[in-house]
Amino acid sequence: MGSCIFCQIASGAIATPLVYEDADIVAFRDIQPQAPVHLLVVPRRHIASLNEPGDEALLGRLLQAARLAAAAAGLRQYRVVVNTGAEAGQSVLHLHLHVLGGRAMAWPPG
Ligand code: 5GP
Ligand code: ZN
């Protein structure tokens, strides 16, 4: 997916400091943070959203990576969000987990 911004970040075509990386996953800071710490955890492989059927093991590793990325950023308490579909707020059509922390969170979310 040549035009996908997260594919370009994951491949290094767009240089972005990584908070966490492994063979399948990268994590980096959101360009428009909604909390003092706001990370995005992204599979290197292009997957459009959580609605794509496929690799269950990768989904587990994404959650594991969210925990490791949160720890690397100094968070022990945080929220993980996966916006799925435009109505839910998904604007980038490459699966990603938001990791938000560093402030008290309200519930329900907007
Ligand atoms: P979504 O709205 O799809 O759940 O989340 C996409 C997120 O990606 C947004 O929070 C947005 O600020 C972030 N984002 C979009 N483009 C870039 C970019 O080029 N670099 C970084 N670091 N974050 C981006
Ligand atoms: Zn992509």
Image (cartoon, rainbow, N blue to C red):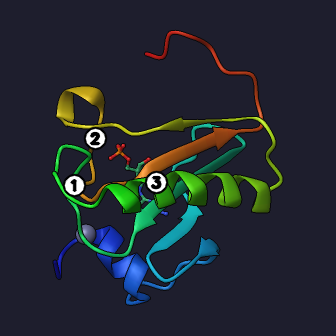
Q: For disc 2, does the CB lie below 8 Å from ligand 1?
A: yes
Q: Pointer 3: what residue?
A: 60
User: Along the line of sight, which residue is nearer the eye, 82 or 55?
Assistant: 55
User: Along the line of sight, which residue is nearer the eye, 63 or 33?
Assistant: 63
Q: Are marks 1 and 2 in contact (CB under 8 Å)?
A: yes
Q: Pointer 2: what residue?
A: 90
Locate residue 7, reporting x and y percent: 31, 76
Q: Looking at the picture, which amino acid does disc 1 mark?
A: Leu
* Image-quadrant location for residue 59: bottom left
Q: Looking at the picture, which amino acid does disc 2 mark?
A: Gln
57 displayed left or right of 36: left
Q: Earlier in the sequence, mark 3 or mark 1?
A: 3
Closer to the eye: label 3 or 2: 3
The secondary element bearing badge 1 is classed as: loop
Locate residue 94, reporting x and y percent: 27, 59
Closer to the eye: label 3 or 1: 3
Q: For disc 1, does the CB lie below 8 Å from ligand 2?
A: yes
Q: Please tell me which residue is depicted at 26% across the width and 46% down the height of the picture.
A: 50
- Callout 3: few (<14), some (14-19), or many (20+) C-alpha neighbours within 10 Å? few
